[in-house]
Amino acid sequence: MILTSPIVQSTLLNCRSDLIALIFFLWCVQQHNYFHEAVAFDCILNAVQRLTEQCKTVKGVILELESIGCVTKAKTFLILLRIYWRGGMHEMVFEPYEQMENYGFVPNTFARNVVMDILFKIGQVDLALKVLKETQVPNFLMFNIALVHLFKLNDVCHIRHVLRVMLRMGYYPNASTFEMVLNSFCKMERLGEAYQVLGLMIGLGITISASIWTILINMLCQLRRLALAGNHLQKMAETGCSPNVVTYSTLIKAFMKSKKVSEAFYFLKAMEYSGHVPDLILCNVLIDCLSKVGRYQDAIEVFLSLSKQNISPDAYTFSSVLSTICLSGRFTLLPELVDGHIIDADLVFFNSLLRYFCKAGFPSAAMELYNDMIDRGFTPDKCSFAGLLSGLCAARRVDEAVDLYHGILVMNNDVDAHIHTIIIDGLVKVGKFHSAIRIFRKAMMEKYPLDIVSYMVAISGLLRV
């Protein structure tokens, strides 16, 4: 392959004249017809970029080529078009396309594909679809480019239209494209369209993969149609397609969230019976969901099972365990559970640890941790503030809590109602009714975003006064 040979690459990269390098590149492409080799275009990117900057426009580059006897052909414009496209120089792509027409050449489908792709990338969706509509002989790649971009935009209406036109013209998406389309409909919870796509795939003889079954099951779980989701798992097995860990995790999480714990454990046992071992993601889901339904010991046992499987917990795992400890009130368990583990802490973990210190009655440790967060460069969020305010109020360190609250107001213009409620409720619980009412009245005067919970807490404080 001449364009990818080390000699040619060295010549292009070390050529003293960008114009000569471009001419040599054009000659190689046209003589040996290696227009499809994307990697070959990387060698000429910098030279063309510098040459375009010198000539100001693509028209200027063409004139420079013509000035030293280079005959301008349609392929010259196509090559320039692809160079700019490959180099991500989006604003320059349209110029060779326009110059091609000015020189009397009709842009082919490849050129229109490139222009349509760039229009999608710069957010000109309507213009991109117009290019598709006005192309007399669109190819499979053109439809595929449109579907990929519309999928990223979650534009279900246009996906449906483009797919219909594509099928009408005799182009049939491959399995990966069908999966992408199906995923779009499922994300938007368009059950009818999703089953239509599935039926079309079956009619065309495309194998329904585990990934596609999982997408459908996930959509049904989101729609809370859990019985139907479970039936799909059975149908999946009947078709000879084996569910994977992701499939089972989707079902287990959905049944756990609906507090159908026995059904969730049924799927967990079925997964283990089929030879699949729970991964870290599923274990994290189990710990979190079991804690929320009050199965604290089960959640802790799932955490302890990780070491037996040689799985290293992550920050999310520890955050879930901390939540379990706080909900169960078994605060002395923490040292035992985290002993020997190296934790790559993130903001979620710090917030969970703040909550633990406050719930366990260690407000000083919570304040130290908060300061450490700041020193490490973390930006506290509303969960950080809520945990610390609750802990300081519970420890009767009222002045510090009020000072922190005012500091939060100074640092953040968009403090939500939950923060105001936390400080008011904390003050009411420790008998500082007048301080609570003063903060509530100021919040009303400053038109802070109070909600119904804020008012109920304030009313409770007034009644107790």
Image (tube, rainbow, N blue to C red):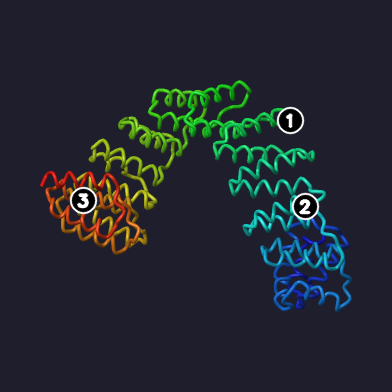
Tell me the number on the disc at residue 424.
3
**Is 103 above or below relative to 37?**
below
Cα gap from disc 2 to disc 1, whole angstroms = 28 Å
**Helix, strand or loop for disc 1:** loop
Q: Quadrant of residue 98?
A: bottom right
Residue 106 in the image, given as x and y percentages of width and height? 85, 60
Question: Viewer-nearest of labels 2 and 1?
Answer: 2
Give the residue type at disc 3: Ile
Residue type for callout 1: Leu
- Residue sitting farthest toward the left: 465
* Category of crowding for the residue at label 1, using alpha-carbon neighbours closer than 10 angstroms: few (below 14), some (14–19), many (at least 20): few
Disc with the residue nearer the chain's start (2 vs 1): 2
What's the CA distance linking mark 2 and mark 3? 63 Å
Q: Position of residue 87 (x, y in %)?
A: 68, 64
Question: Looking at the image, which residue is at 88% across and 62% down?
Answer: 31
- In the drawing, what numbered circle is on residue 134? 2
Looking at the image, can residue 406 be seen? yes
Q: Please give the name of the residue rendered at 77% of the width and 60% of the height, measured from the top-left corner.
A: 4
In the foreground, 37 or 109:
109
Total of numbered circles in the picture? 3
